[in-house]
Structure formats: structure tokens, C-alpha cells
Amino acid sequence: MTGFPLIIVFVAAIALMILAISRFKVHPFISIMGVSLILGIVAGIPIVDVTLEDGSKISGLSSVISSGFSGTFSSIGVVIILGALIGSILEATGAALKLADMVVRFVGKRRPVLALELMGWIVSIPVFCDSGFVILNPIRKALVDRTGESSVAMSVGLASGLYLSHVFIPPTPGPIAAANTLGVGDNLLMVMGFGVVCSILPLIAGYFFSNYIGKRVRSADEANAEEVAKSYEELVAAYGKLPGGWDSIAPIIIPIILMAFSSIVSMVGTTGIVKDLLTFLGTPVIALIVGVIFAVIQLNNVGKIERFYNLTNDTLKTVGPILFVTAAGGVLGKVIANSDMVNYITQHASVLQSMGILFPFVLSAILKSAQGSSTVALTTTAGIVAPLLPVLGLDSPVRACLSCMAIGAGAMTVSHANDSFFWVVANFGAMTPEQGYKTQTANTLVLGLSAMVEIVLLSLVFH
């Protein structure tokens, strides 16, 4: 099948995938793989490899699926595992809590909502937003009591910071996987840089919305000062010996520095052993291995090195589903790339070109709202968009990074009842589901749209 009918089948296939995940609760891996297989058959991809008269080969559907799956796994799997392992160690040692305290001291207690938003933004770089909210919630409660600030404002502010870095900044698995699929996985430093820049406007918007909604919605989180302080002190005591400031931040900052040096020597044209060494150390996999080493040193310094095996084992269990969903997204992208759809779209590109950077955002937002998972929205949208980057005029490295950011913005829009983070924010923030829609759901709409405004403006400057 070719031409416009194939486009219709593609849209129907995506709708079927969304319906299977959201309505019939089919696991995203099964749903994406099943849709990829059906789409490949309908698109006319040969069942087996075909050798043409001129000696060239056309890959069969089984080969396309295998190469899409293994290619994604081999290129991004280790990076996702290492990033998640660093996050697990930071949680276990109390380094995430230490980082939060450092941000509070830096920002000050007079701006508690801003302090929580920024600490959430930092902590969620290596730690999943769900876990980050649970970890930082005692600090939120303590600050509510100490400052008299609205509990809802504090919850929404914290959720804003956590969510932004969760969808924008590696080594969170979603942005890593999306960047790799879009062809910029080897330049994670640029992805991180754009993630930081694209967080600015939504951080501001999230801060003002938090204060706005905090005056209009009141939660049931009314614990007295003694109970709140006690719970916070118990949390600190539960960690025993907290790591120092440098120990806490080293597993995050060292990989970033190594990747920065690698980019610098590449730009300035350095040659010889120095360039080779810094390029090697700045490779995302190697940089994150160094980050893991510093995390293990941190684990040893707080006397918890014996937990390293179990932490690694638990991390592998956690990232397993993410890896498989990511690989399935790679399969879908490979099927699309091997169909005639890209050629047809290329020949009739005016409509898509008019959407440009908005296309990844809209598609990601649809997937996010339909099935709930930001990671699934990121990885699946990236797999669909990757073959279309040249058609959309987004195939330069910088514009591919902006596409990754647009997908991330869509992956926030919106969080509601089918999203686990929605329930984390509502439940730990002592809000009813109805209040959750007024706060968390509305806030993620504000965050996604404000992020997209900034991304569109950046796309006018960077080419």
C-alpha cells in the first residue's frame, strides 16, 4: 500500500495503539509491537528479505523489526541503565535530600515555592519525578509549616520542577531515548543545554501558576508544626549519615563536565592523545560509568556499600519496562522508515512543513493525554518523528535537539488520572482527584504550552 491510503492506515494504527493502551490496558510494549507488525504488513514490507536483480536487498519485515529493536537496545540501553542506577544510589544515600537542602539555603526560606520548584528541577535530573516528589514531600510539608505558605502552591511548585527536568534533561531515560532516536544521542551535552534553556519560561510560568492556584484551592494537608518537624527529622535520621555536598553532586556534575570537555576538544580541533582521551571519557556511556563510580564512592562513604548489589538489581527491574518500550518505539520508527509513507510525505510536504516544530509537540501531547506515561510519549513520538525530520525541516543537529524538546513539552501535556504522577502529587499533596485536575492537570497544560512558546522562539533563531 502506498500514497494517501497508507497515511490513513498509519493514523488508524496510531489510534488503535492509543486505544489499546488507554482503554483496554494492553501493555505499551505489546501494543506498539503489535501495531508495528500490522502496519508493516499493510504497508507492503516483504515478509522475508528480497534480493533484487542488481544485487541490492530489501529487508523483510522480520529483519526490520529485529534491526529496529536491537539497534535501539544497543545504542541506548546501557545509558538508560547507568542513569537510573545513579538516581537509585542518590536516593539510597540521602544525596537527593542533601541536594534539596543545598537549594533551600541558596534560594532562601522567603521564597519557599521557588526553592521547592528549583530543588525538584535539580533532583529529578537523575531521579524519576514520582520518586522525587515522595523524597522531597517531607521538606515541602516542613516548609509549609515554617513559612505559612499554601500547601497547594508548594505541591504544584515542586511538581513543576520535577516534571520539567523529567521530560527535558538527561540522564532521565525518556529524554535520552528520544535524543538517541532522533540522531543526537551522541551529543547529550547539547541536549542537556537545550533542556536547561527550555526549562526557563515554564519554570517561571509554573511558579506564577503555583502561587495563583494556591490562593484558590485548599488541601487537607494541615499537620501541626510538631508532627511535620518530627516527620522531617525522622526522614533525615533514617538515612543515618548524609553525604557531603561534593559527594552528593559529583555523580551528576562529573559526567556533564566530561561531556563538555569532549565537545570542546571537538570544536577547537585538538588532536593527539588528549583529544582521544577526552573524547573517550566524554562519550555518554563512559561519562555515566564515571558518574556511577562517584556514586559508588558516595555509597561507601555513608557506610552503605553492601546495598550496591540490591540497588543494581532493583534498578534493572525498574528500567526493564522502559528499555523494552523504548526498543518497541524504535521498531515502529524502523517500520515507518521502511514503508513508502516517508516518500509520499516528502512529495507532499507542504502541510507538514507548515507545522514544523509543532508537529512533534502535538503528536506527543496526544499520546501523553491518551495513555498517561511521559516516557512512552517521548519514546514513541521520537520513533514516529525521526524518519520525518528532513520533511519537517528539523534534520540539523540543533533542530533535532529542539524537536526532542518539543516532544518533551508534549509529554507533559497533560497529566491526569491515567498518569501515576498525577496520583502521587494529589495523594501526597493531600488533595482530592477534583483538586488534582484543578492543580496538577491545569499546571501541566501551562507548563507544556509555555515550554512550546519558548521552543518555537528558539527555532526561529537556531537552524
Image (spheres, rainbow, N blue to C red):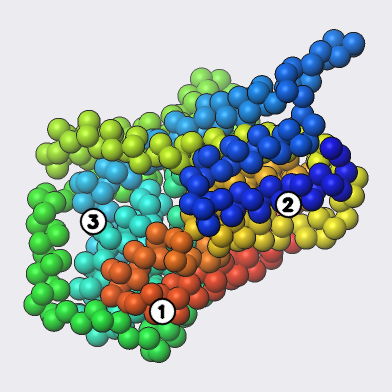
Q: Residue 297's spot in the image, x, y percent?
A: 23, 35
Separation of marks 1 and 3 at Cα, in angstroms: 34 Å
Residue in the foreground of this view, choosing between 339 and 305: 339
Separation of marks 2 and 3 at Cα, in angstroms: 47 Å
Q: Residue furthest bottom?
A: 216
Q: Classify residue 221 by image quadrant.
A: bottom left
Rendered residue at 65%/23% (across/down): 62
Q: Classify residue 407 by image quadrant.
A: bottom right
**At numbered mark 3, what does the secondary structure look like: helix, strand or loop?**
helix
In this rendering, would 103 be left or right of 59? left
Give the amino acid at mark 3. Lys
Label 1, on which residue?
A: 434
In this rendering, would 10 be left or right of 36? right
Label 3, on which residue?
A: 98
From this view, report whether residue 242 is shown above or below residue 36.
Answer: below
Residue in the foreground of this view, choosing between 260 and 459: 459
Rendered residue at 26%/66% (across/down): 137
Count the marks: 3
Give the amino acid at mark 1. Glu
Is residue 81 visible in this depiction of the protein?
yes
Q: Residue 134's spot in the image, x, y percent?
A: 28, 60
Residue contact at pointers 2 and 3, CB within 8 angstroms: no
Label 2, on which residue?
A: 11
In the image, which disc is placed on residue 443?
A: none
From this view, report whether residue 357 is shown above or below residue 153.
Answer: above
Which of the two labelled residues, at mark 2 and mark 3, occupies the earlier sequence position? 2
Q: Residue 58's spot in the image, x, y percent?
A: 79, 20
Q: Residue furthest front?
A: 24
Q: Alpha-carbon neighbours of circle 2 within 10 Å: few (<14), some, or many (≥20)?
A: few
